[in-house]
Amino acid sequence: RYSLANEKRPSPTETIGYRVRCSKTHSGWAWDVKRLRFFGKNGKATFPLRPIESGNAGKGYEAAGAILEGKAGMWGGRSDCKGQFWIGGEFPIGTEISRYELEEVQDDPHNSVAGSTLLERRDTASPNSTDGASWVP
């Protein structure tokens, strides 16, 4: 699945994070992501300094397994307190993501795949939201 970032976004100099969010999954309680890659305007993959996530299934199912360079594994995603699922990372200030590639676990007996996804970025100039950040599509 490929998605393009919306061009009407805050300045990338204010960006400290990107995430991919879905409001519901087919299972209703889990989102299993095998791999998530972010790409800059130059077309090259860019990796976060630190992964972020809404929640996970426990040890061995953290976001790092799906998002960090050189890590093997998957994210056994669980929703946050608002029922939203999201996975992403903290990037150096000024990082601008133009697209992402998301590979979900297809042979999952629980059908833990997203209905649809949205790329969001955190803008440091906005007031904090309830999850400690302001995220914009």
Image (spheres, rainbow, N blue to C red):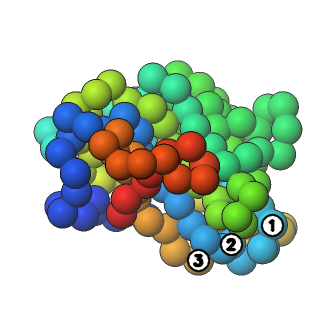
Left or right placement of residue 14 versus residue 53 in this view? left
Q: Are marks 3 and 2 in contact (CB under 8 Å)?
A: yes
Compared with residue 60, is residue 132 higher up or lower down, i.e. above or below?
A: below
Q: Distance of mark 2 from mark 1, alpha carbons? A: 7 Å
Asked whether the viewer can see residue 22, the reply is yes
Q: Amino acid at mark 2?
A: Thr
Compared with residue 96, is residue 100 higher up or lower down, i.e. above or below?
A: below
Q: Identify the residue under disc 2.
A: 25
Residue shown at the point (37%, 59%) measured from the top left: 136
How many numbered discs? Answer: 3
Callout 2 environment at 10 Å: few (<14), some (14 to 19), or many (20+)?
many
Q: Amino acid at mark 3?
A: Gly
Quadrant that contains the C terminus: bottom left
Q: Are marks 2 and 1 in contact (CB under 8 Å)?
A: yes
Left or right placement of residue 74 versus residue 78 in this view? left
Q: Are marks 3 and 1 in contact (CB under 8 Å)?
A: no
